[in-house]
Image (cartoon, coloured by chain):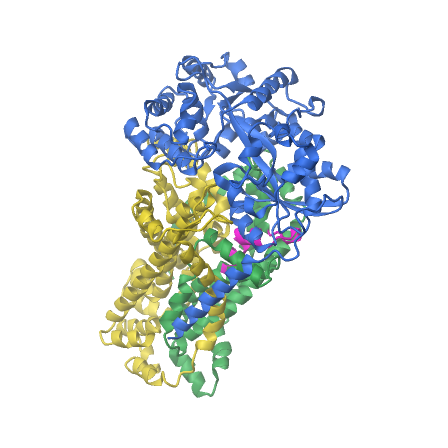
Amino acid sequence: MKTKKFLAVAGLAAASVLILSGCGNGGAADANVKPATSGEVNWWGWTPDTAVAKRYIAEFNKEYPDITVNYKNFENVDYRNTLVPALESGKGPDVYDLSAAGGVPDTWGPYAIDLEPLAKDTLGDDWKKKFSAGYVDQLTGSDGRIVSLPLGGMSAGFLWYNKNIFDEAGATVPTDYTSWVDACAKITAIGKTCFAMAAGGDDTFPTEMYHSIANSVDPEFFIKASTGKAKWNDPAGIEVLEIIAKMKKDGIIASNVLDGTQYPQANEAFMKGSAAMVQMGFWYTQYAEANSCAASMEAAGVANPTCFVQLPLEFPDVAGKGHGSQYFGEVDYGLAIAEDSKNIAASKTFVSWMTMSEKGQQNVANALDLLPGLQGVKPDWNAISLVDKSVQQPAIETLIADSTATTQTRQWQATEKSLHGIVVAIQRVLDPTLSESIPDIAAKLQDASEASTAGTK
Amino acid sequence: MSNTSIRMRERAAVTGTDREQSRPSRATGPRKRRGASGLLPSGFMWILPALIISVGLIYYSIAYSGFLSFFSWGGGRQHLKPVGLDNYTEIFSDPVFWMAIRNTVIYFVVVFTVQVIGGVLFAAAMHSRVIMANVYKVIIVIPIVVAPATMAPAHIQVWQSDGTLNRILEAIGLGDLAQSWIGQSTTSLLVVILVGCWGSIGFGFILYFGAMTQIDPEMLEAGRIDGAGNFRILFSLVLPNVRSITISLAILNLITALKLFDSVWLITQGGPAHSSEFLGTMIYSETSGASRDLGYASALSIILMLIAVATSIIVQRSSRERAAARPRRGRRAVSEERNV
Amino acid sequence: MFETRTVLSRVGLQLAVTLGVLPFLIPIYSMVAKSLEGRGWGNYEAVLAVPGFGRFFLNSAIVAGGSIIIIYLATLAAAFAFSKLRIRRKEVYFWMLMAALTLPEVVLIAPLYSTAVALNLLGTFWAVILPIAALQIPFTVLIARGFIDGIPDTLFEAARLDGAGTWRLFWSVLVPMAKPIAVALVVLVLINAWNSYLLPKVFLINDDMGVVTLLPEFFKRQYNDDIPKVLAAAVVTAIPTIVAYILLQKQFERGMAAGAIK
């Protein structure tokens, strides 16, 4: 009987903690307070890396020396698991990262103040148009509140190649399926890996490759299937998986493809200079810069690295329909201000400087890892030392222009279930110890998927 | 209970020492205790600190998870949508769940067996005359000292297609066996299990090494006089005497296998195509996704907890019954009575 | 334990043990070798140069020390009571304790966070020490109970006949007798507390409260981690635990030789 009593007490304690944690916003500042030039801001995020954030903050402090910004970086999953209880308790961060994916604006958005008045005050009534197309909408809650302002975006749907390896092998960059196979033959002949790819595990990275191939098969298929307007086992979906199987058979995809995940496996192979091509998105541009290139080669285990020249490459026309893949992209993340924050005034100054000032956005552009959220900000090439400026600068300028112009979203309109379904389907195709037919695999993908409603209203 | 000590004395008696005479006879042992139990001081106050810390802190989490498991919830201020038992029925109809259960059973059986045999052998060897025993001890214990998460890149290094293992195989002329160990549905679980064995023998070693000090050297001597060899002594005399450790390890391994997460996650992430999935990795990927359902993850955790507690109780009960049944039939009733 | 009377059998045992530990060395070798890639010993210099390096070790020592003291006392007391004292519905309490061991850490974070806030422990070492203790105690009690079961009741009965109270029994009979298993427990708790990552990460929110497991973070980036330095950091963090293990083991063996146990 003691037990019963004890359980009752435990239940009561549990309930009281739930209640206690529900009302933690005593002493918070007013959301309408004007931006201030002094104070302290605690900023939490999974991105940027601490070193990059410190650079941003140092620049910010040149203008606002009396605002102290403390940045705390979390690994992605730790962040998701920590942020909500922290915000719920009222003792969380003042400013926090918010992504567009998977309904996050509705999960974390309700803890944030509406930033529309701040944006209007800073950029004028047509403030929305000053950001890249779609970025603000992707970060808006379903109740229409602007819960965060975009810091930057990204794009994908293309490859990166190591120019030095291509030159050494006497290969030309592939534009379609046959030229890809030819290039691979020449590259493997000099003892290098042709195309670094890792599709093991649970990581949704391989969906980028699926998406690119799908765009080559039918530019509308991926978004249609994601939003339930087409089936993943329609002929186009089956064709995509068949192309992947063929790429393995013809040696474009290496036999160790399921050993690991894109990071670290494929990244390491490319950065070591042992693979000629890799599929990565816009964030990879940062390694065209001499210092980050050397650092990441060292991180891949190269002693005294000499940087190679890496360049973006259009996704080859693998389906033979006259086009490769168009780029797909969306906002990467935005900054939100917690409504329970005691430092809303200083936080407003920081967030507007980061997202809406020319100088703050210039920092983002110069880091070459994100497309700046504010339109018209371009990297300051004089402040950036590329490995080989003459070829890399024009290529990156084109990449930025095409990325900014893209109209297709990357993962925003796909549910987590569909993305995971794609990963498992690719693994079923590539696993040499499984022998399922491709239509069966595609049918299973359709069963595992879930249509998204994002962007369809 | 003092089954072990009693059995120890019984063994000693069987093998012919006269130690037994100097202690109270074994027949009076249990009866005496039973009669005295009314006089024993109450121990409730003594377990209170442990209860307050563990039960007090964790039961809120259990209640919270139990509550959430009947909802669909993305976290934060998203609407808590009541779904009744849907999370549970969805789990039981999910083939990935059954794959995880199958993997858990295989993992448990193999890792537990290897841990017990390896742990006992090493502990016995370290209790023997071995030169540089300290060096060996350190090597055996390093795998449990280093966090599994930090070891993962090294394991990948060993098992990947161009990794250490395949190179060793090629060097000794078994190149045909070289394969993509991590990247095949048929071998990924094997990698996870062997990494598990590697990381848990040291744990068995530490516990058995400590427990073996309880064994009476005279009993071993008696066994030797009877002509038993080293292994015979180890497995028929020593192992039964450290039974409590073996049972604890069984329970712990069971719970570890059910919760298994970091080494799997960092090596195979449950893949390829869910072939090395465990409950722990399922829960993790459910809480880690952008569009996560914490209700579903909670239901998985509750199922995990129920399986863990139920099977642990069965393990302990059955081992106790076996222990009681073996030396003497009559003791069974007594030991059960004592433990209620 | 193994009897080796002849030279041959001694060599045989030595050889068998040597072969037995070889598979242990392969991943350890891979780890150390990989930690020397890139900048070689420079990786270790980079780890030592992380700002607040010493502070991290101190903080980890605080967390580990606090956990060990709490767990050691709570465990021995509870195991003593479960094994040698009278408790009604003993097994119910025991399994209530064991159930606390079964929830995965990721699931615990959110409820533990609100508990920490409610008890006003956020940003104090208690917010980490108490959950670590809560998660370790069930298992340490299980182990210790098994061991104490093996200590003959007659010893306690004799002491009680001499007029010793429960308190005396605990300190003068149980604590010395349980020394071998206590060493094992201390080592296990030390390892777990020292290696705990998620709890300190989430609950020690102040910058000067970082622990050693956060060291590799300095070399991890959102996209590509500096794996050689991450592994160098792992090697450096593991050293104190290994040293502690050797020292404890030595002391414990000395104690045995002096006849404190038998």
Q: Is residue C6 visible?
A: no
Q: Which chain: blue?
A: A
Q: Is residue C215 visible?
A: yes
Q: Residue at x 49, y 73 (%)?
A: C175
Residue C257 lies in the magenta stretch: no
Q: Is residue C2 above or below residue B27?
A: above
Which percent across, then down, holds residue C14? 41, 52
- Left/right placement of residue A337 relative to residue B281 reads right
- Provide the major secondary structure of the magenta segment: helix
Q: Is residue B279 above or below residue B120?
A: above
Chain C color in figure? green
Q: Residue at x 64, y 30 (%)?
A: A126
Chain B color in figure? yellow
Q: Residue furthest left?
A: B329
Magenta stretch, residue numbers? C189-211
Which percent across, then down, holds residue B67? 41, 57
Q: Residue at x 36, y 65 (%)?
A: B244
- Left/right placement of residue C178 relative to residue A350 reads left
Camera-side residue of A151 and B155? A151
Which percent across, then down, holds residue A374? 64, 29
